[in-house]
């Protein structure tokens, strides 16, 4: 779902891209395509999909940190958004672990 949103509503992801990063629109589209490719690989049981998904989660972590810091500094930010921005950061670790586990399951043929 997130990969599709990257493509149809890229504005939702603009605040995740630090202003120092060039071509933010391109990064949003490419990361959305990468999410869709990884999702298709996970669903179809491809061996590369787990490590690729883990790498993608690691690659987007700086954007999630950037967003949490920015929204946390904004005195007008909705407290629920601030809380969710910070709560999603520790969620990255089990998601990375789960992505890597999918490779182990696929490698064992289970």
Image (tube, rainbow, N blue to C red):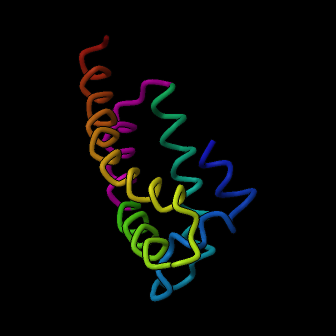
Q: On screen, 18 above or below 40?
A: below
Residue 34 placement (x, y as % from top left): 52, 52
Q: Looking at the image, which residue is at 45% across and 31% down?
A: 42
Q: Is residue 53 magenta?
A: yes
- Quarter occupied by the C terminus: top left
Residue 16: x and y in percent read 51, 69
Question: Left or right of 27: which side holds 54?
Answer: left
Where residue 86 appears, as percent x and y from the top left, is 38, 58
Bounds of the magenta span? 44-59
Q: Is residue 48 left or right of residue 79?
A: left
Quarter-wise, where is residue 107 in the image?
Answer: top left
Q: Quadrant for the N terminus, please.
A: top right
Q: Is 94 displayed left or right of 85 in the figure?
A: left
**Count of labels shown?**
0
Instruction: State the image coordinates of residue 101 (x, y, percent, origin top left).
Output: 26, 29
Instruction: Reply above or below: 34 against 29.
Output: above
Q: Which residue: 29% across, 30% down?
A: 103
Residue 76, magenta (yes or no) = no
Q: Main secondary structure of the magenta part?
A: helix
Against 78, is 34 above or below? above
Q: Residue at x 60, y 65 (%)?
A: 13
Residue furthest out toward the bottom: 20
In the image, 83: left or right of 50?
A: right
Residue nearest the observer in this picture, 94 or 75: 75
Which residue is farthest right? 8
In the image, what residue occupies the spot 58% across and 64% down?
78
The one of 66 and 26 positioned closer to us in this rendering: 66
């Amino acid at each position: 779902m997130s990969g599709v949103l990257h493509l149809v509503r890229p504005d939702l992801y603009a605040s995740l891209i630090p202003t120092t990063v060039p071509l933010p629109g391109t990064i949003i589209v490419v990361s959305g395509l990468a999410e869709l490719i990884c999702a298709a690989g996970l669903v179809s049981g491809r061996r590369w999909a787990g490590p690729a998904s883990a790498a993608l989660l690691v690659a987007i972590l700086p954007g999630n940190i950037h967003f949490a810091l920015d929204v946390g500094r904004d005195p007008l930010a909705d407290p629920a958004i601030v809380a969710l921005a910070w709560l999603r950061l520790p969620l990255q670790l089990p998601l990375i672990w789960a992505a890597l586990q999918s490779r182990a399951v696929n490698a064992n043929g289970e």
